[in-house]
Image (spheres, helix red, strand yellow):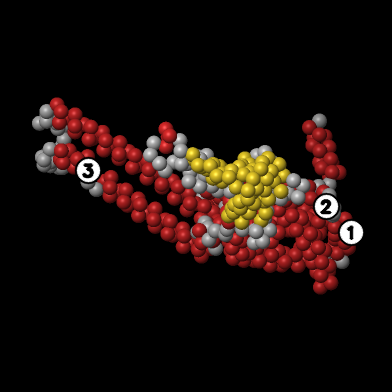
Amino acid sequence: MKKIYWLVIKSYLGPFIMTFFIALFILLMQFLWNYVDDLVGKGLEWYIIGKLLFYASSTFVPLALPLAILLSSLMTFGNLGEFYELVAMKAAGISLRKIMMPLIAMSVVISLVAFYFSNNVLPVANLKFKSLLYDVREKKLALDIKEGVFYNGIEGFIIRIGKKDADDKTVRDIMIYDHRDKKGNVNVTIADSGRMEMTPDRMNLLFTLYSGHNYLERTDQRNYRFSRPHQQSRFSEETRKFNLVDFEMTRTNEDLFKNNYSMLNIRQLDKAEDSLTLALDEKKEQVRKHLIGEFYFYQRIDSVKQKSFEPAKPYTSDLLADYDKKQRADLLDIAMNELRKGRQNIQNYQKEKEEKTKIIYKHQAEWHRKFTLSVACFVLFFIGAPLGAIIRRGGLGLPVVVSVLFFVMFHIISITGEKSVKSGVIDANYGMWIAPVVLLPLGFFLTIKATTDSPLLDADAWLKIYRKLIGKNN
């Protein structure tokens, strides 16, 4: 019996590892396709790109792992059925349930590892990935001064080069506009030729200019707009130094990102949700006191005309009878302004309440997601394994098609439930568990059909049923 268990486990491990990394690679290629514009042309070091891809691949595990379990279990039992190994085991008195036992135990272990990964590793991976991606996207494009184009990549300067020689260092027909004083094109340098070189630390760009002029419009004198004072100097050789520190990628402090709900574990999510709920309750109480506590409309009327009111006395249409026409107009203006202000305050509070409530919903969805990954791995195994025993086809042909169909269905249901939770349509206790609840009965149904050798996907069996139905109708 142990040899059979080891045979099943070995048959499962190979497809599982292969399909997991294939799925991870496909998701990683999709990531590169989406962000290729943010990565190309910035002169990023290879280790920066390597770290970004590593962190990105870590965040794709919740998608790749369930798909790998579904596909590998289907391939494993499909191969065993295709080569009649399942038939031989059943002939020896070993039921399909016993054959599935070692993989069920392995699925439990994988589910526990998935929970640990989702709760402890994934928040850190999200933090590293999103902070690094932010820095990469904010990094300037690498220095590339082209011929005949005004280049403004260096802050405070605009540079134009007429022509570059073959060595890519000797340049001709140079114009440099100095905009550091933010006064327009009042400081211009023109040179016939020059050399453009980087310093050894690549932190500065050196321009050695030959046979040129410096033109400066003096704006520090009185009536310069009318007199247009002008200063001109000639040089045979001049060196200009440009700081390239802005082209270096600077790392943002990760503490600025760590409070996002996708970067918290279960304990931190509970604490953050409690804090958000408490803050929302305090805001509700403040608004309630402000609107219901004292009637500020009558307080404003009382401040215009020092006249006391009796709040218990019912107010009639003769409330403004003691005031002249101008005072009535002033009081009505004050009342209208206060009503507008109160309406605006209520609208602002409503928007703030909706935003904070949505953040709470997102925390709740993320909390449940820590568990749904593990449950998804377990549920999809009970779909893939019996389905493979029923189909009896191994390899990467039909199993891939069937697995992708079931996984797409699972993913669509999961995304729909998650979006409904985050928008407040469905409670997180229900919305985040729709996909497992829908597919778990399907897994039990397929397992029962597989263990009873039901001809679920046998075309001849369905054809017989169809003929019987046709015969009865006739």
Is any atom of residue 170 visible in this view?
A: yes
Separation of marks 1 and 3 at Cα, in angstroms: 84 Å
Along the viewing direction, whichever of 318 and 232 lies nearer the viewer = 232
Instruction: Say what amino acid the circle numbered 3 marks.
Output: Phe
Along the viewing direction, whichever of 259 and 67 lies nearer the viewer = 259
According to the image, label 2 marks what residue? 396
Total marks in image: 3
Q: Residue 336: percent from the left, percent from the top?
A: 26, 33
User: For residue 306, what is the image quadrant?
Assistant: top left
Q: Residue at x 52, y 39 (%)?
A: 185
Task: Choose the circle earlier in sequence order: 2 or 1.
Answer: 1
Instruction: Say what amino acid the circle numbered 2 marks.
Output: Leu
Contact? badges 1 and 3 (CB < 8 Å): no
Task: Choose the circle earlier in sequence order: 1 or 3.
Answer: 1
Q: Residue 311: percent from the left, percent from the top?
A: 15, 42
Task: Choose the circle earlier in sequence order: 3 or 2.
Answer: 3
Instruction: Say what amino acid the circle numbered 1 marks.
Output: Tyr
Question: In what element is the residue under mark 1?
Answer: loop
Q: Residues within 10 Å of mark 1 (few under 14, many from 20)?
A: few
Question: In what element is the residue under mark 2?
Answer: loop
Q: Residues within 10 Å of mark 3 (few under 14, many from 20)?
A: few
User: For residue 215, what is the image quadrant?
Assistant: top right
Q: Residue 18: percent from the left, percent from the top?
A: 79, 59
| Quadrant where the N terminus is found in the figure | bottom right
- The answer to whether residue 355 is left or right of residue 326 is right
Disc assigned to residue 295? 3
Q: Residue at x 75, y 58 (%)?
A: 21
According to the image, label 1 marks what residue? 84
